[in-house]
Image (spheres, rainbow, N blue to C red):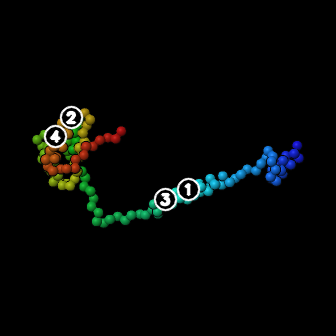
């Protein structure tokens, strides 16, 4: 039997018509070359950031001043500087904070149980004083 397999293999190499024919590798090589060209072309579009550098600290850098912070709790009490404010004192307290930090932004922390009217009151007074950068602090869930 082994003699028969050897003779069939020798006929396949010789080009005879037999069950064991040589496998044509040309299509596979074409695919390999196309993939090689694809990877070479796409690799040239990938930009590496380069070496890591340690940046120098600037001597003339101006630190950003902290924001003015106002809080409204669940009982609609308005807080500034860790103390509650009466409604008639809100404008004076915001004016004082603005004088201390003229370019600072106003951040309002509002409890979810607080009424929207209290938020409108504080933001309205801030708008009257010329505070344009007003943010409402939220929690990201």
In the rendered view, tell whether residue 121 sits above or below residue 11. Answer: above
28 relative position to 85: left or right:
right
Q: Nearer the viewer, mark 4 or mark 3?
A: 3
Q: Which residue is mark 1?
A: 38
User: Disc 4 to disc 3, how far (Cα)?
Assistant: 54 Å
Q: How many marks?
A: 4
Q: Is residue 68 visible?
A: no
Q: Which quadrant would residue 54 be assigned to in this image?
A: bottom left
Q: Secondary structure at mark 2?
A: loop
Of 40 and 113, the residue lying toward us? 40
Q: Which residue is mark 3?
A: 45
Of 91 and 9, the residue lying toward us? 9
Which residue is most to the left? 88
**Residue 18: x %, y % from top left:** 81, 46
Label disc, if present, on residue 121 of the rendered structure? 4
User: Disc 2 to disc 1, how far (Cα)?
Assistant: 61 Å
Quadrant of the frame with the N terminus: top right
Which residue is most to the front? 17
Could you tell which of marks 3 and 1 lies nearer the N-terminus? 1
Could you tell which of marks 4 and 1 lies nearer the N-terminus? 1
Could you tell which of marks 2 and 1 lies nearer the N-terminus? 1
User: Disc 2 to disc 3, how far (Cα)?
Assistant: 54 Å
């Amino acid at each position: 039997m082994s003699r028969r397999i050897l003779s069939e293999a020798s006929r396949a190499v010789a080009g005879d018509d037999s069950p064991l024919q040589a496998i044509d590798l040309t299509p596979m090589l074409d695919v390999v070359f196309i993939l090689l060209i694809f990877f070479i072309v796409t690799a040239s579009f990938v930009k590496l950031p380069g070496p890591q550098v340690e940046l120098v600290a600037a001597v003339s850098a101006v630190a950003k001043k902290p924001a003015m912070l106002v809080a409204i709790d669940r009982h609609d009490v308005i807080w500034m500087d860790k103390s509650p404010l009466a409604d008639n004192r809100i404008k004076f307290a915001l004016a004082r904070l603005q004088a201390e930090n003229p370019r600072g932004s106003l951040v309002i922390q509002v409890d979810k149980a607080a009424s929207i009217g209290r938020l409108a009151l504080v933001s309205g007074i801030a708008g009257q004083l010329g505070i344009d950068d007003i943010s409402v602090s939220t929690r990201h869930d």
